[in-house]
Image (cartoon, rainbow, N blue to C red):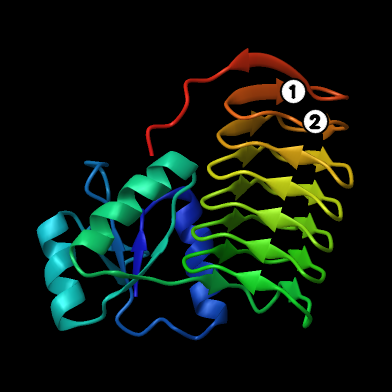
Amino acid sequence: MLIVGAKGFAKEVLEVVYQLNQLDNLVFYDDVNTDAPDKLFGQFPVLKSIGEASVYFKTVDNRFTMGIGNPILRKKLYDRLIAIGGVFCSTISPKANIGVFGNNIGEGANVMTGTVVTADVTIGKGGLINLNCTIGHDSIIGKFVELSPGVHISGNCSIGDYSVFGTNATMLPKLTVGKNVIIGAGSVITKNIPDNCVAVGIPAKIIKYLSPLDF
């Protein structure tokens, strides 16, 4: 498997891959940071060009997962690696508590240690559910959504594609947050939030509007 990124969050994804006992032929991919090592932890090769990634997909293993945050960047790198034959795969920690009934986790999701997902929850493609998050029943988490550590989503909630929740944000039941929304760390969402905005505070209030995404 190839993990996109070779810093910060990629190291946490490595831990999940270790938990899953899937270290064989594992590599990282970083074509941005000039200080990326040739081998991470002296063990795992770091590929530094799209050409190297293409050769790896064709000759070793075509699976990849994300080791970076930022929904828009995750989507752009997903498009690049799919175009050269990659297959988007989820990394779900065995130390997460995923309920048995009605849950649907899309391709390429990262579900990290300590997460609790109850029942009838949908997590969209490329979602990042970070350490110790909880997601209540009948909730829908859109594509490439990022929930930072300690986020709590109550039951019957909906979050639009490409939105980001800061650390320890809380969403009360039966609410909707739109597409391309940033929720500040520690905020409490007590009413619906529309697309393309930044909301912070207790209760969360809109402080800025964002340009709509072009995809």
Q: Is residue 101 left or right of residue 180?
A: right
Image location of residue 7, percent across then percent down? 41, 50
Which quadrant of the structure image shows residue 116?
bottom right
x%, y% of residue 176?
75, 40
Q: Which residue ends up furthest to the top in the rendered image? A: 207
Residue linked to disc 1: 200
State whether residue 130 is above or below residue 119. above
Which amino acid lies under the numbered mark 1 shown in the image of this protein?
Val
Residue lying at 54% horizontally and 82% vertically, measured from the top left? 20
Quote the CA–CA distance across marks 2 and 1.
5 Å
Q: Position of residue 177 (x, y in %)?
A: 71, 37
At mark 2, the secondary structure is: loop
Q: Check the image and report above or below for 139 versus 185.
A: below
> Taking 158 as reference, is 9 left or right?
left
Local crowd size for mark 1, using a 10 Å CA cut-off: few (<14), some (14–19), many (≥20): many
For the N terminus, the image quarter is bottom left
- Viewport quadrant of the C terminus: top left
Q: Amino acid at mark 2?
A: Ser
Q: Nearer the viewer, residue 212 or 88?
A: 212
Q: Give the labeled residue for mark 2.
A: 187
Which sits in the foreground, 203 or 10?
203
What mark, if any, has residue 118 been given in the picture?
A: none
Q: Report whether 70 appears left or right of 157.
A: left
- Label tally: 2
Q: Is residue 136 left or right of residue 91?
A: right
What residue lies at 79% left-to-right and 80% top-to-bottom?
101
